[in-house]
Amino acid sequence: MAGPDERNGEAGLPAGTSSTETLSYLSDIIHELKHLADRSGQRTLSAILSAALIEARIQKDDQRR
């Protein structure tokens, strides 16, 4: 969620960030969330985050081509 001074989609990223950089950032965040879900025994949430992580990595790879 964006903060009060940020428009949606810009939270935590500097202006001019490329799609590849954004997807890399998202991959990192999703990976951390999945790790938290794993540690707390949230199996369904972990599986959903795993799918999201795979998708983010696929999209990042597609952006590089």
Image (tube, rainbow, N blue to C red):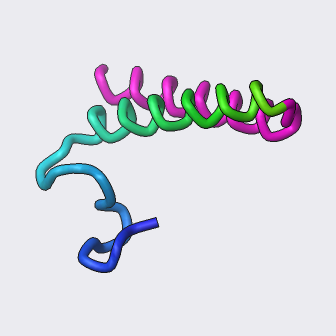
- The number of callouts visible is 0
Q: Is residue 4 left or right of residue 28?
A: left
Q: Position of residue 4 (x, y in %)?
A: 32, 79
Using the image as rendered, state which of residue 64 and residue 13 is in the foreground. 13
- Magenta stretch prevailing secondary structure: helix
Query: Residue sitting at 35 percent across and 71 percent down?
Result: 3
Residue 32 counted in the magenta span: no
Q: Position of residue 51 (x, y in %)?
A: 70, 31
Q: Quadrant of residue 48?
A: top right
Query: Which residue is at 49% across, 24% downward?
Result: 57
Q: Is residue 21 left or right of residue 33?
A: left
For residue 47, side relative to residue 52 (left or right): right
Horizontal and vertical percent position of residue 32:
55, 30
Nearest the viewer among 50 and 42 is 42
Magenta stretch bounds: 41-65
Residue 13 in the image: above or below residue 4:
above
Check the image and name the residue furthest to the left.
16
Query: In percent of the image, x 74 and y 34: which residue is there?
Result: 37
Q: Verify whether residue 61 appears in magenta.
A: yes
Farthest-out residue, front: 40
Nearest to the observer: residue 13 or residue 61: 13
Q: Is residue 31 above or below residue 29?
A: above
Quarter holding the C terminus is top left
For this orientation, the residue located farthest to the bottom is 4
Q: Position of residue 25 (x, y in %)?
A: 36, 36
**Quadrant in which residue 50 is drawn:** top right
